Amino acid sequence: MNIRLSEVLKHIGDEYRDKISDRPGTRNYLEVDIGKRAEEMGFSDISEKYRAVNAMVPLKNEMPGMKVRIDGRTFINYARYTSGMIVPGYVATDTGLPYEPYVANDCMILNS
């Protein structure tokens, strides 16, 4: 169980709490770089390992700005936490927190 990684994910979840959709099947999402967020929090020991590894924040509503359509098959072996946040399966395993398998839509929309 990686407590610092869990803290980073909790911080991301808290930051986007009002925007995270609690219903499955949401197409619109944001990406948050776990490694960058770990570095901002002063966790240099995990920032390199998780650099360019993204947590997905499923959105209640689409956000203004550019949209990119992403093939849902990109998200094989992803996990969903009870907070609604989605991470790659190996990240979920590293935290040791309870999760369920995530099944993406055929087409997802990245908001940026």
Image (cartoon, rainbow, N blue to C red):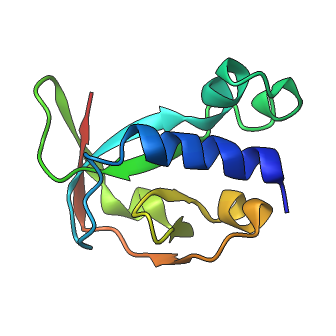
Q: Is residue 56 above or below residue 88?
A: above
Q: Residue at x 38, y 75 (%)?
A: 103
In the orientation shown, which residue stands out farthest toward the right?
45
Q: Residue at x 10, y 27 (%)?
A: 64
Q: Is residue 24 above or below residue 7?
A: below
Quarter holding the N terminus is bottom right
| Quarter where residue 106 is shown | bottom left
Q: Is residue 99 above or below residue 4?
A: below
All told, the count of numbered labels is 0
Q: Residue at x 58, y 49 (%)?
A: 10
Residue 54, position as x, y percentages in the image: 54, 41
| Quarter where residue 40 is shown | top right
Q: Is residue 16 left or right of residue 27?
A: right
Q: Is residue 43 left or right of residue 80?
A: right
Residue 94, position as x, y percentages in the image: 78, 61
Quarter holding the C terminus is top left
Q: Name the residue nearer the viewer: 24 or 10.
A: 10
Q: Name the residue nearer the viewer: 71 or 41.
A: 41
Residue 20, position as x, y percentages in the image: 30, 53
| Quarter where residue 23 is shown | bottom left
Q: Residue at x 80, y 36 (%)?
A: 49
Residue 31, position as x, y percentages in the image: 41, 38
Q: Name the residue nearer the viewer: 97 or 48.
A: 97
